[in-house]
Image (cartoon, rainbow, N blue to C red):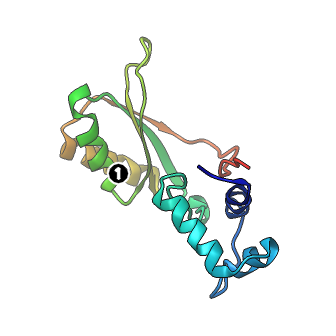
Amino acid sequence: MIDDLDKRIIARLQGDLALTPEPFAPLAGELGLAQSEVVARIARLAESGVMRRFGATLRHQQSGFPANVMVAWRVEEGRIEEVGAKLSAERRVSHCYWRKPQPSFPYNLYSMVHGKTEQECREIVGRLARETGVGDYEMLFSLEELKKTSMRYY
């Protein structure tokens, strides 16, 4: 279970951290805690599964990967985890989700593939299709990024 202090730490971690050798020191100062206590609480939140991870948000268009495509895969139910693991292991895949298929759109596994060009994205997807043996998929290329933020819980 998390307490109000944990919620304050989580809220602060949802924003930017200082690019310093001790990025948790300012947070510790704000909370009136020792930096070691803040680090211990973050570790406990991670170990308990409350907080899975935190990391940088990369603006892929500005980092040399302006092309991206959401790939909707139609995967046999018994192979979802296997195929999901293979897609997730690809370094050009940033997201991979299992979702319930719909009658009008029967795809159940979704991944975001990033590349330098649309053609490169197509090549990566083609290779992934061959490696996984999944040939039923749709590629939905992004036209414009309208919003990109991390979820804020507190």
At horizontal 69% and vertical 72% (from top left) the residue drawn is 17
Q: Left or right: 38 with respect to 119?
A: right
At horizontal 58% and vertical 63% (from top left) the residue drawn is 58
Q: Amino acid at mark 1?
A: Ser
At horizontal 61% and vertical 61% (from top left) the residue drawn is 59
Q: Quadrant of residue 7?
A: bottom right
Q: Left or right: 118 with respect to 142?
A: left
Judged from the image, the secondary structure of the residue bearing numbered disc 1 is helix
Q: Quadrant of residue 103?
A: top left
Is residue 63 something one can see in this rendering?
no
Say if 93 sits above or below 55 in the image.
Answer: above
List x then y, in percent, for residue 127.
25, 49
Figure disc tally: 1
Q: Quadrant of residue 139?
A: top left
Instruction: Give the residue pinned by disc 1.
Output: 88
Q: Nearer the viewer, residue 93 or 23?
A: 23
Q: Nearer the viewer, residue 14 or 109?
A: 14
Q: Nearer the viewer, residue 135 or 99?
A: 99
Say if 138 sits above or below 68 in the image.
Answer: above
List x then y, in percent, for residue 151.
66, 47
Q: Nearer the viewer, residue 29 or 3?
A: 3
Is residue 44 something one can see in this rendering?
yes
**Outermost residue toward the top in this view:** 103
Residue neighbourhood size for the residue with mark 1, other residues' Cα within 10 Å, grouped as few (<14), some (14–19), many (≥20): some
List x then y, in percent, for residue 84.
31, 43
**Outermost residue toward the bottom in this view:** 21
Say if 115 sits above or below 24 in the image.
Answer: above
List x then y, in percent, for residue 23.
66, 79
Say if 124 sits above or below 133 in the image.
Answer: below
At horizontal 46% and vertical 60% (from top left) the residue drawn is 47
